[in-house]
Amino acid sequence: MTQKMNVESFNLDHTKVKAPYVRLVGITEGANGDKVHKYDIRFTQPNKAHMEMDGLHSIEHLMAENIRNHSDAVLDIGPMGCQTGFYLSLINHDNYDEVLDMLEKTLKDVLEATEVPACNEVQCGWAANHSLEGAKEIAEEMLKHKDAWHEVF
Protein backbone atom coordinates (compact mmCIF):
# COMPACT_ATOMS: atom_id res chain seq x y z
CA MET A 1 0.00 0.00 0.00
CA THR A 2 1.64 3.18 -1.12
CA GLN A 3 -1.34 5.48 -1.53
CA LYS A 4 -3.49 6.45 1.45
CA MET A 5 -7.12 5.53 0.82
CA ASN A 6 -10.26 7.32 2.01
CA VAL A 7 -11.66 4.24 3.75
CA GLU A 8 -9.86 3.46 7.02
CA SER A 9 -10.01 -0.31 6.60
CA PHE A 10 -8.40 -0.06 3.14
CA ASN A 11 -5.33 1.35 4.92
CA LEU A 12 -5.24 -1.56 7.39
CA ASP A 13 -2.84 -4.36 6.55
CA HIS A 14 -5.24 -7.29 6.81
CA THR A 15 -2.32 -9.75 6.75
CA LYS A 16 -1.00 -8.43 10.07
CA VAL A 17 -4.18 -8.47 12.22
CA LYS A 18 -5.00 -11.37 14.53
CA ALA A 19 -8.73 -12.10 14.70
CA PRO A 20 -10.94 -12.18 16.59
CA TYR A 21 -10.58 -8.67 17.99
CA VAL A 22 -12.40 -5.42 18.73
CA ARG A 23 -10.64 -2.31 17.42
CA LEU A 24 -11.55 1.36 17.57
CA VAL A 25 -11.49 2.49 13.94
CA GLY A 26 -11.98 6.18 14.53
CA ILE A 27 -13.91 9.00 16.10
CA THR A 28 -15.95 11.48 14.08
CA GLU A 29 -17.05 14.72 15.72
CA GLY A 30 -20.26 16.37 14.58
CA ALA A 31 -20.94 20.09 14.22
CA ASN A 32 -22.64 20.19 17.64
CA GLY A 33 -19.90 18.28 19.48
CA ASP A 34 -21.40 14.79 19.37
CA LYS A 35 -18.80 12.09 18.79
CA VAL A 36 -19.37 8.87 16.88
CA HIS A 37 -17.01 6.02 17.81
CA LYS A 38 -16.71 3.34 15.14
CA TYR A 39 -15.44 -0.13 16.03
CA ASP A 40 -14.19 -3.00 13.87
CA ILE A 41 -15.48 -6.20 15.48
CA ARG A 42 -13.56 -8.89 13.64
CA PHE A 43 -14.91 -12.41 14.03
CA THR A 44 -12.68 -14.32 11.61
CA GLN A 45 -9.16 -14.00 10.24
CA PRO A 46 -9.24 -11.93 7.03
CA ASN A 47 -8.54 -13.90 3.86
CA LYS A 48 -8.34 -17.16 5.84
CA ALA A 49 -11.92 -17.64 7.05
CA HIS A 50 -15.34 -16.03 6.78
CA MET A 51 -18.82 -16.37 8.24
CA GLU A 52 -21.29 -18.31 6.12
CA MET A 53 -23.96 -15.96 4.82
CA ASP A 54 -27.04 -17.53 6.44
CA GLY A 55 -25.39 -17.54 9.89
CA LEU A 56 -23.98 -14.04 9.39
CA HIS A 57 -27.41 -12.78 8.33
CA SER A 58 -29.03 -14.25 11.43
CA ILE A 59 -26.38 -13.00 13.86
CA GLU A 60 -26.77 -9.57 12.26
CA HIS A 61 -30.50 -9.58 13.09
CA LEU A 62 -29.88 -10.93 16.59
CA MET A 63 -27.10 -8.48 17.43
CA ALA A 64 -28.89 -5.48 15.92
CA GLU A 65 -31.95 -6.21 18.03
CA ASN A 66 -30.24 -7.25 21.26
CA ILE A 67 -27.25 -4.91 21.54
CA ARG A 68 -29.66 -2.02 22.02
CA ASN A 69 -30.83 -3.70 25.24
CA HIS A 70 -27.33 -3.16 26.63
CA SER A 71 -26.64 0.43 25.51
CA ASP A 72 -28.56 3.51 24.43
CA ALA A 73 -25.46 4.74 22.56
CA VAL A 74 -25.78 2.29 19.65
CA LEU A 75 -26.32 3.97 16.30
CA ASP A 76 -25.75 0.93 14.11
CA ILE A 77 -24.15 -2.48 13.86
CA GLY A 78 -23.72 -3.95 10.41
CA PRO A 79 -21.75 -6.67 8.65
CA MET A 80 -18.65 -6.20 6.55
CA GLY A 81 -19.01 -7.25 2.94
CA CYS A 82 -16.02 -9.57 3.32
CA GLN A 83 -18.04 -11.58 5.85
CA THR A 84 -15.28 -11.42 8.47
CA GLY A 85 -16.85 -9.03 10.96
CA PHE A 86 -19.11 -6.13 11.83
CA TYR A 87 -18.86 -2.40 12.30
CA LEU A 88 -20.38 -0.93 15.45
CA SER A 89 -21.08 2.80 15.69
CA LEU A 90 -21.78 4.44 19.05
CA ILE A 91 -22.63 8.05 19.84
CA ASN A 92 -20.94 9.84 22.73
CA HIS A 93 -19.59 6.62 24.19
CA ASP A 94 -15.85 6.13 24.50
CA ASN A 95 -15.45 3.37 27.08
CA TYR A 96 -13.72 0.45 25.35
CA ASP A 97 -14.25 -1.96 28.26
CA GLU A 98 -17.98 -1.23 28.22
CA VAL A 99 -18.01 -1.96 24.47
CA LEU A 100 -16.46 -5.36 25.16
CA ASP A 101 -19.02 -5.98 27.90
CA MET A 102 -22.00 -5.06 25.70
CA LEU A 103 -20.63 -7.28 22.92
CA GLU A 104 -20.23 -10.21 25.31
CA LYS A 105 -23.77 -9.76 26.64
CA THR A 106 -25.14 -9.50 23.11
CA LEU A 107 -23.38 -12.67 21.98
CA LYS A 108 -24.72 -14.49 25.04
CA ASP A 109 -28.19 -13.28 23.99
CA VAL A 110 -27.56 -14.95 20.62
CA LEU A 111 -26.78 -18.24 22.36
CA GLU A 112 -30.06 -18.05 24.29
CA ALA A 113 -32.22 -17.10 21.29
CA THR A 114 -35.00 -19.41 20.18
CA GLU A 115 -35.71 -17.54 16.95
CA VAL A 116 -34.21 -14.92 14.67
CA PRO A 117 -36.00 -11.56 15.05
CA ALA A 118 -37.62 -10.07 11.95
CA CYS A 119 -37.04 -13.28 9.99
CA ASN A 120 -39.98 -12.87 7.64
CA GLU A 121 -40.68 -11.34 4.24
CA VAL A 122 -42.32 -8.24 5.70
CA GLN A 123 -39.32 -7.24 7.85
CA CYS A 124 -36.36 -8.74 5.96
CA GLY A 125 -35.13 -8.47 2.40
CA TRP A 126 -33.92 -12.08 2.20
CA ALA A 127 -35.98 -13.89 4.82
CA ALA A 128 -35.25 -17.35 3.41
CA ASN A 129 -31.52 -16.95 4.07
CA HIS A 130 -31.20 -17.44 7.83
CA SER A 131 -29.67 -19.95 10.22
CA LEU A 132 -30.20 -19.61 13.95
CA GLU A 133 -27.83 -22.53 14.50
CA GLY A 134 -25.21 -20.86 12.31
CA ALA A 135 -25.56 -17.62 14.29
CA LYS A 136 -25.09 -19.51 17.54
CA GLU A 137 -21.95 -21.23 16.21
CA ILE A 138 -20.49 -17.86 15.22
CA ALA A 139 -21.32 -16.34 18.62
CA GLU A 140 -19.91 -19.31 20.51
CA GLU A 141 -16.63 -19.20 18.56
CA MET A 142 -16.27 -15.44 19.15
CA LEU A 143 -16.98 -15.81 22.88
CA LYS A 144 -14.31 -18.53 23.21
CA HIS A 145 -11.70 -15.89 22.42
CA LYS A 146 -13.05 -12.95 24.45
CA ASP A 147 -9.90 -12.68 26.54
CA ALA A 148 -7.99 -11.77 23.37
CA TRP A 149 -10.45 -9.29 21.83
CA HIS A 150 -8.18 -6.38 22.77
CA GLU A 151 -5.24 -7.86 20.84
CA VAL A 152 -5.37 -6.64 17.23
CA PHE A 153 -1.81 -7.43 16.09
Image (spheres, rainbow, N blue to C red):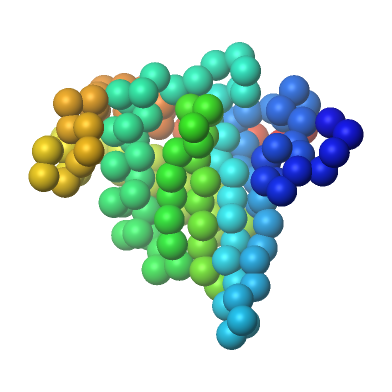
Among all residues in the image, which is located at the extreme right?
2
Quadrant housing residue 22 = top right
Question: Which residue is depicted at the point 57% across and 66% down?
Answer: 36
Q: Nearer the viewer, residue 119 or 4?
A: 4
Which image quarter is the N terminus in?
top right
Q: Which of 34 and 24 is in front in this view?
A: 34
Question: Which residue is depicted at the point 34% across and 49% down?
Answer: 64
Percent across and percent down for residue 33 are 62, 82
Count how many numbered circles sit on residues in the image.
Answer: 0
Question: Which residue is depicted at the point 52% across and 46% down?
Answer: 87
Among all residues in the image, which is located at the extreme top?
48
Q: Is residue 153 above or below residue 25?
A: above
Percent across and percent down for residue 28 are 65, 66
- Any part of residue 22 in sight: yes
Among all residues in the image, which is located at the extreme bottom?
32
Question: Which residue is depicted at the point 88% across and 34% down?
Answer: 2
Taking the image as shown, residue 60 lies to the left or right of residue 94, namely: left
Which image quarter is the C terminus in?
top right
Percent across and percent down for residue 126 are 22, 32
Taking the image as shown, residue 70 lies to the left or right of residue 133, namely: right
- Any part of residue 93 in sight: no
Percent across and percent down for residue 143 are 47, 33
Q: Is residue 63 above or below residue 127?
A: below
Quadrant housing residue 124 = top left
Taking the image as shown, residue 148 lies to the left or right of residue 75, namely: right
